[in-house]
Amino acid sequence: MFVLSADYQNETEVGEALAEVFQTGLVKREDLFITTKLWNSDHGHVVEACKSSLRKLQLTYLDLYLVHFPIATKHTGVGTTGSALGDDGVLDIDTTISLETTWHAMENLVSVGLARSIGISNYDIFLTRDCLAYAKVKPAVNQIETHPYFQRDSLVKFCQKHGICVTAHTPLGGALANTEWFGSVSCLDDPILKGLAEKHRKTVAQIVLRWGIQRNTTVIPKSSKLERVEENIQVFEFELTKEDMDLIKSIDRNYRTNQPAKFWGIDLYA
């Protein structure tokens, strides 16, 4: 599985790597599940933005295309990912494009074969419910921040009840990256989680990922260190007990670590 985004600015490099492994026969396209995302400034240019991503990835279709954030902002050029700010230093929100309009354009991608499935990201219960009401093609996924300090049980259960897969884009609480960007606290330092790690002879990260899996969410941790990537995969040979799961449930702080308001001058979650 590859989870990308126009905003991450990694599509070109990944596309070059994919072309190489396809050409050498190391892997086939159908063996991979490739996801990328529509950036805020391209809500009025969905088809063009998707095609731009496909060109960079050197692909003919995506397995999943997500609306990155439930907000349209001033268009800055297809495929560009700048967040235009107004004179007041606040994100320049485009009030002429509704999320329903964006979603119907996303549905068109499925109709023409550019995306095999479509989904949403960072949607709360209200926005997810609305999407279900106007969707002809139901969102396959809602990719959200969720971890032991931000469990969001109501949202997770709502999505699962309505057949929407929940993917945790920050399953470890952002760890060092979010601490550096936003000054947030990581759940990886929690004493209860450390105690469970000792009990199961696993790392804290493995405990947190296993917890995410056992609540039927898809977890997509990221790391630039090969040993961490290998470690993150080793979470299928053990299980947390009901008592373990209940203990982790007790440490929920309703604590969001990803705070784009720092860059946008507005709290979109207010």
Image: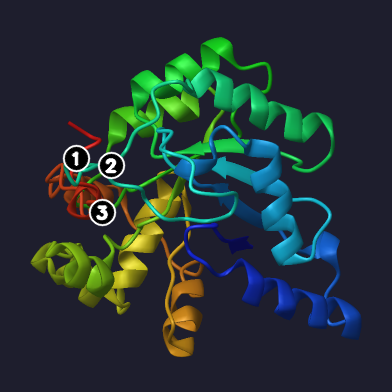
Mark 1, residue position: 266
Please state which of the two labelled residues, at mark 2 or mark 3, is closer to the viewer.
Answer: 2
Report the Cα–Cα distance between label 3 and label 1: 13 Å
Q: Looking at the picture, does residue 86 appear above or below residue 198?
A: above
Q: How many C-alpha atoms fall within 10 Å of the one at disc 1: few (<14), some, or many (≥20)?
A: some
Task: Tell me which residue sits at (57%, 20%) in the image.
Answer: 101
Task: Tell me which residue sits at (44%, 70%) in the image.
Answer: 222
Name the spot of residue 83 as percent of width and height, x first. Answer: 37, 50
> Which kind of residue does numbered mark 2 sit on?
Leu
Please state which of the two labelled residues, at mark 3 or mark 1, is closer to the viewer.
Answer: 1
- Color theme of the render: rainbow
Q: How many C-alpha atoms fall within 10 Å of the one at disc 3: few (<14), some, or many (≥20)?
A: some
Please state which of the two labelled residues, at mark 2 or mark 1, is closer to the viewer.
Answer: 2
Report the Cα–Cα distance between label 2 and label 1: 7 Å
Whether residue 188 is visible, yes or no, is no
Mark 2, residue position: 91
Instruction: Compare residues 259 and 219 and report the one nearer the observer.
Output: 259
> Which kind of residue does numbered mark 1 sit on?
Ile
Are the two marked residues, 2 and 1, in contact with CB atoms closer than 8 angstroms? yes
Pick out the residue farthest to the top: 133
> Which kind of residue does numbered mark 3 sit on?
Asn
Which of the 4 image quadrants contains residue 196? bottom left
Q: Quadrant of the C terminus?
A: top left
Instruction: Compare residues 2 and 191 and report the one nearer the observer.
Output: 2
Pick out the residue farthest to the front: 87
Mark 3, residue position: 258
Report the Cα–Cα distance between label 2 and label 3: 17 Å
For label 2, the SS is loop
Q: Looking at the picture, does residue 22 appear above or below residue 158?
A: below
Name the spot of residue 32 as percent of width and height, x first. Answer: 74, 63
Mark 2 or mark 3: name the one nearer the start of the chain.
2
Instruction: Compare residues 229 and 247 and report the one nearer the observer.
Output: 229
